[in-house]
Image (spheres, rainbow, N blue to C red):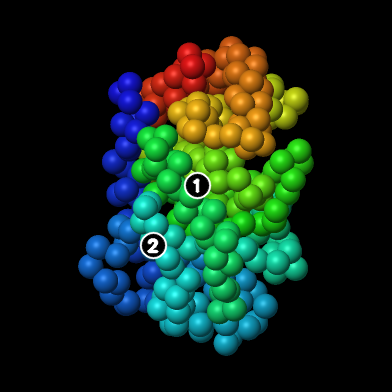
């Protein structure tokens, strides 16, 4: 498994996602029969969870009209947001800050697709498509194709500002990220968050639970639970792999941002090596443990 794309091709994830999608749809619409093969499509996996989250939020508010929309109408209405890309059908949105949800399920405000959702403006959609092209050229297209099907652009930042990106377990295959206007930099952040979504699905599919131990995180400068530490030791190496594979085709400010990212990550990965080796023993599935180690060591060797 020396090829990174092969390392990320984990069959139990696909089976888990099919079963999970079918289970969510059964909760929303008991007895409903989805289109044949529909539960296997990455975008449908994401949309099922947006519908479930939206329905739960509506139910908690006592909003029966919106609840009914998520249960009976949203499956078809949300298709208006979809546009094709080289990585398959995507939804790209850019909600205003006041549309984000502040709730107990995420430390960061997040967004759920709903009846008032609109597509991102064309320039943002074009920037995202450009990022997809760069991701495809890096060899990580399958990762992002499966694990970043709904992309929520949360705001534009200057290249010298800290960019915020995140994913939450309740909305798999969804990525939230700021952007600078540079497609190559956006591609890095899509890879990073798709990696978190991949690992969440892998842990769930293989029924692996990470014990509550702590390790020093060079990325945070403090101790973190093993779960978050291992996530960082998987996602950041993949951003290094992506960046070094596409860096020669970048220029200007974007090139400088990405080159600096690689310099920083080399230092962080070296600092994390000892604790990573220890934390990896907590992953009880041998195959997953091997895959995480291959990605980490591959990035360190670059």
Q: Quadrant of residue 75?
A: bottom left
Q: Quadrant of residue 48?
A: bottom left
* Sequence order check, earlier mark of 2 and 1: 2
Neighbour class for label 1 at 10 Å: few (<14), some, many (≥20)?
many
Neighbour class for label 2 at 10 Å: few (<14), some, many (≥20)?
few
User: How far apart, in angstroms, are the residues tagged by discs 2 and 1?
Assistant: 14 Å
Q: Is residue 168 visible?
A: no
According to the picture, the residue beneath numbered tag 1 turns out to be 131
Q: Is residue 47 above or below residue 176?
A: below
| Residue 274 screen position, x and y as percent | 59, 12
> Could you say whether the residue bearing mark 2 is in a helix, strand or loop?
loop
> Could you say whether the residue bearing mark 1 is in a helix, strand or loop?
helix
According to the picture, the residue beneath numbered tag 2 turns out to be 84
Q: Quadrant of residue 123?
A: bottom right
- Which residue appears at 51% of the width and 58% of the height? 126
The answer to which of 2 and 250 lies nearer the viewer is: 250
Q: Residue furthest bottom?
A: 65
- Which residue appears at 44% of the width and 41% of the height? 135
The quadrant of the rendering that contains the N terminus is top left
Q: Is residue 75 above or below residue 46?
A: below
Q: Is residue 86 above or below residue 66?
A: above
């Amino acid at each position: 498994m020396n090829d990174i794309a092969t390392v990320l091709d984990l069959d139990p994830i696909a089976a888990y996602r099919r079963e999970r999608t079918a289970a969510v749809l059964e909760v929303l619409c008991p007895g409903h029969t989805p289109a044949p093969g529909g539960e296997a499509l990455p975008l449908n996996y994401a949309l099922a969870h947006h519908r479930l989250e939206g329905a739960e939020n509506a139910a908690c508010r006592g909003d029966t009209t919106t609840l009914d929309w998520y249960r009976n109408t949203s499956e078809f209405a949300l298709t208006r947001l979809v546009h094709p890309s080289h990585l398959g059908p995507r939804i790209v949105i850019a909600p205003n800050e006041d549309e984000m949800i502040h709730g107990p399920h995420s430390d960061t405000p997040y967004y759920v697709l709903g009846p008032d959702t609109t597509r991102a403006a064309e320039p943002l959609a074009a920037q995202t498509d450009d990022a997809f092209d760069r991701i495809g050229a890096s060899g990580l297209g399958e990762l992002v194709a499966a694990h970043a099907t709904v992309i929520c652009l949360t705001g534009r930042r200057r290249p010298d500002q800290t960019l915020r990106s995140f994913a939450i377990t309740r909305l798999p295959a969804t990525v939230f990220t700021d952007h600078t206007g540079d497609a190559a930099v956006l591609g890095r952040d899509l890879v990073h968050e798709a990696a978190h979504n991949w690992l969440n699905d892998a842990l769930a599919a293989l029924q692996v639970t990470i014990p509550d131990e702590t390790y020093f995180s060079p990325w945070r400068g403090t101790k973190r639970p093993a779960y978050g530490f291992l996530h960082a030791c998987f996602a950041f190496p993949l951003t290094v792999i992506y960046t070094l594979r596409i860096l020669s085709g970048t220029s200007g400010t974007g090139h400088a941002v990405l080159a600096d990212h690689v310099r920083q990550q080399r230092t962080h990965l070296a600092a994390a090596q000892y604790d990573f080796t220890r934390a990896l023993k907590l992953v009880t599935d041998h195959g997953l443990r091997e895959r995480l180690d291959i990605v980490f060591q591959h990035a360190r060797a670059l």
